[in-house]
Structures are given as C-alpha cells and as structure tokens.
Image (cartoon, grey):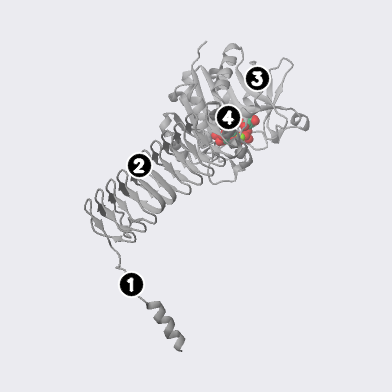
Amino acid sequence: MNSKISIVVLAAGLGTRMRSKKAKVLHRAGGLTLIEHVIKAASEITDPEWITVVVGHQSHLVERTLAHTGIKFVEQAEQKGTGHALRMCQAGLEERGGLLVVTYGDGPLLSPATLRRLIKTQEAAETAATLIAARMDDPTGYGRVLLDERGFVTGIVEQKAATPEQLAVRLANSGIYCFRADLLWKHIAEIQTNNPSQEYYLTDMAEILTRAGHSVGVMEVNDVQELLGINTRVDLAMVDQIFRERKVRQLMLDGVTIEKPETVSIDVQVRIGMDTIVEPYTRILGSTDIGEDCSIGAHSIIEDSRLADRVEVAPMTIVANSRIEAEAHIGPFARLRMENHVEAGARIGNFVELKKTHLGAGAKANHLAYLGDAEIGAKANIGAGTITCNYDGVNKHKTTIGPGAFIGSNATLVAPLEIGEGSYVGAGSVITDPVPAEALALGRARQIVKPEWASRRKALADVK
Ligand code: UD1
Ligand code: MG
C-alpha cells in the first residue's frame, strides 16, 4: 500500500532545559542544526510541500535555516504542549487524509529507514496509530509506554506524572508516531491539560484513541541511539559524538585513513576522497569537499573549503572558505582566512596569512607574510616578511603581482599597486608606485658604510 504521507515536525519550544537564549532546535550536532537533521530524514520520505514544521520560539531564525528546503511552516504562538502544537496543523492538513507522521525537532538521529518501517507497520495494521518505542536501561526523562496484555498501547505517562510503578517501566516513548490522519483529527480536540505541567500532551492521544474503541500499536526498535531526544547540553554533546563517530567510521570504510579517529571532528556534510590521510585532532567542517590522496595535518581546521587531489595541508593550519587546487602545499601554521583561490602546485608556508587572495599556479609564499586582496601571478615568489598594505584606514585596495615576479624579503607593498611580470622588488623596500615588467624596484634607504668607525670609537673610549 502506498499511502499519502504527511510529516509534522514539532519545533516550537524554547527548550528551557538547554538554558540557552537560542531555540533548542537551532543548536548544532555533527555540524548541522538539530532541525536540519530531522528535515533531512523527513525529506527522504515525502515531498517538501507535505512536510510541516511547527515553529514558535525564534520562528524567523528556524524558518531562515530551513528556507532552502521548500517545506511549510505553521506558527504556534504560545507553547501549550506537544498536543497543542500538532493541532496548529489541523487546518492545513485535515483534508489530505492518509497517514500523518509526527516527529519532534529535538530528535536528530532518527533514520529514514526507521521512518519507512514505521509507516509500513502502520499500513499493515488495523490500528489508529503506531508509535516508536525502545527499552532503555535508563529511561529517565522519557514518557513511559503502558501496554495491555495483547501488546497494544493503553497510555503514555510522562516522567513528571508517573507513579513509582510506572517509572519502573523501561519502554520509553520516542516521540515519533504514525497516525491515521482521519482519526487523529477527529479526536485531537479531546486532549486536556490535566497533568502537572498543565500542557496539552500529544502523548494523551494513545489513551484517547483507545477509549474511542481503536487500538494503538507500538514498534520497538533496538537501536536506542536513534531515538535520543535532546533536552540538555549533556544530551547535545552525546548526540554530537554519535554523529562524529558515525561520520569517521563511514569515511574510513570509504577509503580515508583517519589516525586516532576519536580525536577528529568531521561534520556530516563533509566529503573526502579515497586515500586521503587525516591526522589526529583535525576539524573538518561545514560544506568542505576534499579530493583524493590529500593529507590534512594534525590540529588543522578546514571549513567550507574545496581541496582538489593531492593537496598537502601541514599541521596547525586553518583554511576557511577557500579553494585549493591540486598538489598545492599549505602550512604548517598558515591561515587562509576567506575567499582565497590557491592554484595548482602553489606553496604557502609557515605564518603566512591570506585573505581574498588569488595565488597563481606554482607561486610561493613560504614564510611570514600577509597577502590580502592580492592577485598573484603564476610562479611569483613572495619573500619572507612581505606585507600587502591593503587598508588605508577607510578602504581596502588591491595588489597585483605579475607572473614570475620576485618580491624580496620584508617588502612593504602599499596598495593599490601593480607589480609587473618578471620584475624584482629589492628586500626591505617600501613600494608605493607601479613597477613595470622586468624592472627592479628599490624603495629603501641607501646603505652607508664608515670604514674603521668602530676602532676609532673604541680608541676614544680608552682615552677617557
Ligand atoms: C516528549 C514526549 C515524551 C517522549 C519525549 C521523547 C510529550 C508530552 N512527551 O517529551 O513522551 O518520551 O518527547 O524525546 O510529548 N514542542 C512544541 N510546542 C510545544 C511543546 C513542545 O513545538 O508547545 C516541541 C519542542 O520544540 C520539541 C518537541 O516538541 O522539539 C518535544 O518537546 P519536549 O519539551 O522536548 O518534550 P519532552 O519532555 O522531551
Ligand atoms: Mg524532548
């Protein structure tokens, strides 16, 4: 059977237990916000137009985070509980019928496979709803699922409202349900607020549907991890670690060498090619894409960047929002701050900072330099201590250095400036005017040598 599937994700709460100014679902695990993980899984089940997120706290930020996905949003202005949140969707979804899957925005580990299995289970059953539950060694904080002798759900009690006997139940409610939409909407208004929190609990639907003569089934899963709901930052750290472990494991299975994988943080979206080596304590973040046969040195941080094949990043290097072509070498201790493009075979050495700079193929800046807003031609050599003075206190200006130019050590290049192809700049120069191709430019005080000066001074000192 192929039912019409709608998915509602509840994400309006602030998440008081996070003790944060930021809405809970906007906290990150594995490099994505919690809500992005949930929407990623939901998007594999149904079309974006049938995915609805209930927003409330910081709704504009949640909507902005998900704007690119094309899903729908419904506002829950006042957070009166999970049952109330789902009710906000009745007007938009009741007519569609079919099956309605409800998940919570704070459960980011749920897999599409488990969602599919939930839907299949409900389709095959005569029940009004199926919920996912798991037997946990420590179900503290979760609602407890109560079953009758046939294994149908008779009710769900929240931690706060449970009797000691009910607290001993280890079957925990995941917060993931699949309802027959017609029966859900018919009975949802029967949820009351007679509980310690005075909230409309969606979990009461189990008892309500049972009372109305229907049954509610339970689908138990063994992988408790998938159902972890984040309520505190301790939960957040635990879930983050699970995402990271899964990611490095998958990369290793796909042919990436990762030394001491437990020390490495790689965001879920990152791609890394075969035979690349990732050394300990690296962080590879955001939408980074790394080619094959690269090496990423220990303690480096690579963020939102693209590295082609055979790129070497030596230890302690930071690369953000940049593109590095094949066989380039970067670091150790280099910083590529933003929007740089390093062409094939170029070399950037220790204590070199690049910002909005294009470094041509085979060009070198091997030691101690700041290159900002610069266009540097192929095979140019940038000496140690070279500084592009790109900022005049008001505006940023560009420095252009032609192919094959040689910039002597400790040159100060005052932008806007053009240095021609194949030219030389003497060491220690301050260059403010254009340098034509093939010229030598010197901009420093002429050296004075006073022969015998030292012995004369010493002799004078002896007289005294
Ligand atoms: C809920 C379940 C509990 C289950 C647990 C699984 C209820 C009453 N309890 O408890 O049985 O074991 O999840 O993780 O449902 N939300 C809204 N509007 C509201 C209230 C909450 O959109 O008015 C959203 C929150 O943003 C959150 C989700 O619903 O994403 C769950 O809310 P939360 O307060 O975390 O419920 P739990 O106490 O964890
Ligand atoms: Mg929760």
> Mark 2 falls on what kind of element?
loop
Say which of 95 and 55 sits in front.
Answer: 55
Say which of 337 and 459 sits in front.
Answer: 459
> Which residue lies under the disc numbered 3?
218
> Which residue lies under the disc numbered 4?
249
Identify the disc placed on residue 378: none
Identify the disc placed on residue 449: 1
Q: Residue at x 26, y 49 (%)?
A: 422
- In the rendered structure, which amino acid carries the disc numbered 2? Gly
Q: Measured from the top left, where is residue 283 in percent x and y? A: 52, 41
Say which of 411 and 251 sits in front.
Answer: 411
Asked if the residue under mark 1 is in contact with the one under mark 2, i.e. CB atoms within 8 Å, the reply is: no
Distance between mark 4 and mark 2 Cα atoms:
35 Å
Q: Which sits earlier in the primary sequence, circle 3 or circle 4?
A: 3
Q: Which sits earlier in the primary sequence, circle 3 or circle 2?
A: 3
Identify the disc placed on residue 362: 2
> Mark 1 falls on what kind of element?
loop
Distance between mark 4 and mark 1 Cα atoms:
66 Å
- The local crowd at label 3, few if under 14, some if 14 to 19, many if 20 or more residues have their Cα within 10 Å, is many
Asked if the residue under mark 2 is in contact with the one under mark 3, i.e. CB atoms within 8 Å, the reply is: no
Q: Nearer the viewer, mark 2 or mark 1?
A: 1
- Compared with residue 319, is residue 463 higher up or lower down, i.e. above or below? below
Q: Residue at x 29, y 53 (%)?
A: 397
Q: Which sits earlier in the primary sequence, circle 4 or circle 2?
A: 4
Q: Nearer the viewer, mark 4 or mark 2?
A: 2
> Mark 4 falls on what kind of element?
helix
Q: Which sits earlier in the primary sequence, circle 4 or circle 1?
A: 4
Q: Quadrant of residue 79?
A: top right
- In the rendered structure, which amino acid carries the disc numbered 4? Arg
Q: Is residue 418 visible?
A: yes
